Image: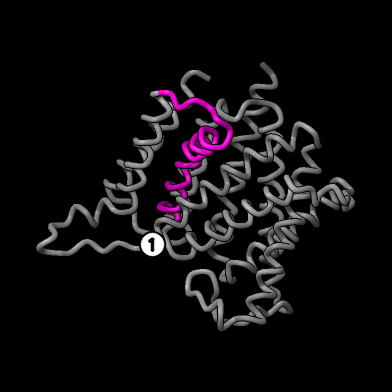
Amino acid sequence: MASIWAGVAHKVGSCLGFSCLNVAIKSAGLPVFWIVLIQNTGAFFWAYICFGYSLKLNIFSPLSCLRAFFALAGVVLWAASLQHLSLFQTISMGLFSPCATIVLAVLVLGESLTWNRAAAISISTLGGGLIQYGKDCSNLPWITPPQFSILPVLPFLATFCFAASNILAKKLLSRSSVEDVGCSLFVLTALGAGACIGVQHWYGLFLNGKIFFNHYTVHVQSILFWKDCIVLGSLTFLAHILMNRALSVHRVLFLLPFGISRPVVSAFLGWYFFKEAWPNPWMWTGSIAMIIAIILLSKKQ
């Protein structure tokens, strides 16, 4: 029983950490790949201070590199979402993550697709559509044609990347410590982000994308830059360590309902810090639908 509540406490703590991290990312004012680079570099710095972690060659194992690839893709998509969508929209779409985990488990691991899983995926997909497009679709087409955008798809894709990363993390935790799994992710993700920045620098005209690449100089000498390094690195370190500890002490599905605390807190933070408009009824309905989907997935746990 003690291990169960320890897992719950670590899960809720990681959700609060990620909520604060979302606010820091949205207010950082840095290009996406720079955000990923400094947050993971800062997180590794704190890991070195706290655990005395030293680099090992086994962090470059195929499984660790694959996890880092999915984590990097997820963070890039997520950071881009935070810069172009409201905090409530992005975080609410994050509620699809449990269903994304089930989809990958069925497709990759060969798990069975039960009726409650299929219902949860359908309800969650409908909820995501209401959050992103409900207001547009409610307008009469002959008065105001609905305007659809690719941006709302970014957090949806990010949830699949995070789900794949978490599944691989669970496998890695069976053979390595929490600190090794967390620190290897920080190092490999930072290296990947640094490589992308290098490619962008040398082939900037080829990768001239408005979503992921911003056209302004990063002043590494400024106090504001180093403040972002400290804040992003600290929150990333705290949130990932708590998440890995939660995964190491209990089953993933049991912990899913406690992730609801993250979007609830983040919705309030978006309204408080960024003066974002209060979510409309379509968004609330979609969020409730996605929460119901999570309950369907985990009711047996």
Q: Quadrant of the N terminus?
A: top right
Q: Tag count in the figure? A: 1
Q: Residue furthest left?
A: 142
Q: Residue furthest top?
A: 1
Task: List x then y, in percent, for residue 64.
Answer: 74, 47
Task: List x then y, in percent, for residue 58.
Answer: 85, 47
Task: List x then y, in percent, for residue 82.
Answer: 49, 60
Give the extent of the magenta segment. Answer: 87-114
The dominant secondary structure in magenta is: helix
Residue 144 is inside the magenta segment: no
Depth check: give the residue in front, 117 or 238: 117
Task: List x then y, in percent, for residue 233.
Answer: 71, 57
Q: Quadrant of residue 126 in the image?
A: top left
The residue drawn where x is 47% and y is 60% is: 81
- Tell me the colour scheme of the image: one colour
Q: Decide: is 23 above or below 247.
A: below
Q: Amino acid at mark 1?
A: Ile
The residue drawn where x is 35% and y is 36% is: 122
**Residue carrying label 1:** 150
The residue drawn where x is 48% and y is 74% is: 210
Residue 96 is inside the magenta segment: yes
